Amino acid sequence: MEPTHISDLPTSVLFDFASGAFEPFLQYTQRKVSDLHEMFADQQAVAEILKNGDRLVYDIRYHPFRTSNSDMSLGVTRIQPGTIGGEYHMTKGHYHEREDQPEIYFCVHGTGYLLMETRDGQFQAAPWKPGAITHIPGMWAHRVVNTGSDELFFVASYHLAAGHIYAPVVERGFAQIVVEQNGQPVFLPNPRRV
Ligand SMILES: [Fe+2]
């Protein structure tokens, strides 16, 4: 973020619980299938989608609240409904660079799971619906999966100093994948680790 955003004054932003609109935001990121192609188990299904064009999987609007001595931030993520090779749309997922930096995720709209995993192999999937709030300790990688037929919105609160590490998730994914079978979400062992 630009240092020009530093302010020691109280700051308010507005989040619309019905639509997911978040104003003002200072940064906007889109993740399309092409940005996430390594994350899905069925690479043939990814290639088929990309052959016929790309599509949005999720977007994030950020508002950092930098002061002269702190760096809290909010991110609002909206995951579109859908599957790729049967695997539900999901965020890329990451570890934090700093293991003393936790994060709070607050599910506002939609249905899914928050997948969490440590480097030593602990795995948890928190069932998510509106109102579910999860504290993610600093050592746990985190990824949100949208298993519903509607958009899933969640709000993330964290310190910018936490940093992001994507490489282990890109290389190995999470312990389990979430796929649609007969219209229901089912957890399967990650085929990349079998
Ligand atoms: Fe995070």
Image (spheres, rainbow, N blue to C red):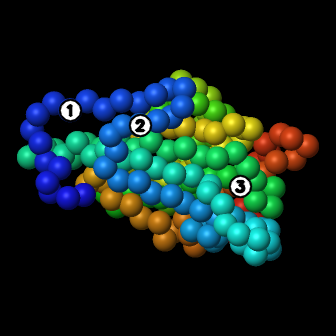
Name the residue at 24% across, 58% down. Answer: 1
Location of residue 179 in the rendering, given as x and y in whole percent from the top left corner:
78, 51
Where residue 126 appears, as percent x and y from the top left, is 60, 37
Q: Secondary structure at mark 2?
A: strand
What residue sits 62% from the left and 70% below the top? 34
Give, as a three-letter code, the residue at label 3.
Answer: Ile
**Residue topped by disc 3:** 177
Compute the Cα span from label 3 to label 1: 39 Å
Badge 3 or badge 1: first in the primary sequence:
1
The circle on residue 96 is none
Work out which quarter of the rendered image holds the C terminus and state it: bottom right
Q: Quadrant of residue 76?
A: top left
Give the spatial CA distance, label 1 vs label 2: 14 Å
Q: Earlier in the sequence, mark 1 or mark 2?
A: 1
Crowd tier of the residue under label 2, counting other residues whose Cα lies within 10 Å: few below 14, some 14–19, many 20 or above? some
Q: Secondary structure at mark 3?
A: strand
Please tell me whether residue 133 is drawn above or below residue 141 in the rendered image.
above
Measured as percent of width and height from the top left, residue 151 is found at: 64, 39
Q: How many marks?
A: 3
The crowding category of the residue bearing disc 1, from other C-alpha atoms within 10 Å (few below 14, some 14 to 19, many at least 20), is few
Residue beneath disc 2: 22
- Left or right: where 35 falls relative to 75: right
Would you say 25 lies left or right of 170 here? Answer: left
In the rendered image, which residue does mark 1 sit on? Answer: 11
Identified at 14% across, 54% down, the residue is 4
Q: Identify the residue at image location x=87%, y=47%.
A: 181
Residue 133 showing in the rendered view: no
* Nearer to the camera, 72 or 52: 52
Element at badge 1?
loop
